Amino acid sequence: MYSAVSRVKTEKASRYLKALCNHFDRKVQATYDDNHGDVQFGFGTCQMDAAGDVLTLNIQADDAEQLERVKQVVGGHLVRFAPNESLEVDWVEQA
């Protein structure tokens, strides 16, 4: 199993968590509340946690290629949902 984490600093952590999960829920299974979300893509998963001004994204996939795809999908959508912020989605791969 491959995994990575990103901690994104934003005053709108909960808002973006809900927006991402709501968006993904149109095509894949997603469950969420104000502070936690789980998204089940066919090629990996993403768990999101909003605490204060930090949105933590934990992703997993079966191989490196699929992990890269999850990074692109989740990170790309988050940046598009926040056009007025310069969000940094820096992934740190986990052992």
Image: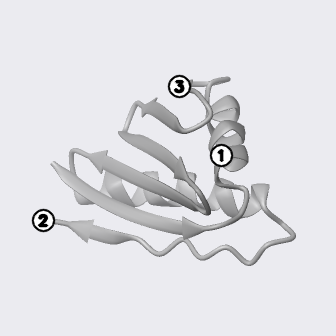
- Please name the residue shown 41% across and 41% down the image: 47
Relative placement, left or right, of 91 versus 12 is left
- Please name the residue shown 59% across and 28% down the image: 33
Relative to 77, say whether 94 is above or below. below
Where does label 1 land, which residue?
A: 14
Q: Secondary structure at mark 3?
A: strand
Q: How far across and down, in percent of the image, does residue 59 sit?
A: 36, 50
**Gap in Å between the C-alphas at discs 1 and 2?**
28 Å
Q: Secondary structure at mark 2?
A: loop
Q: How far across and down, in percent of the image, does residue 21 sit?
A: 61, 34
Quadrant position of residue 81: bottom right
What amino acid does circle 3 point to?
Answer: Ala
**Gap in Å between the C-alphas at discs 2 and 3?**
26 Å
Classed neighbour count for the residue bearing mark 3: other residues with Cα under 10 Å, few (<14), some (14–19), many (≥20) = many
Which of the colour schemes (rainbow, by chain, secondary structure, one colour) is used? one colour
The one nearer the camera, 47 or 15, is 15
Relative to 21, say whether 13 is above or below. below
Relative placement, left or right, of 86 versus 32 is right
- Please name the residue shown 79% across and 72% down the image: 85
In this rendering, which labeled residue sits more in front, label 1 or label 2?
A: 1
Give the residue furthest to the front.
52
Where does label 2 land, which residue?
A: 95
Relative placement, left or right, of 63 versus 21 is left
Where does label 3 land, which residue?
A: 30
Q: How far across and down, in percent of the image, does residue 78 sit?
A: 66, 57
Task: Please tell me which of labels 1 and 2 falls first in the chain.
Answer: 1
- Please name the residue shown 48% across and 46% down the image: 49
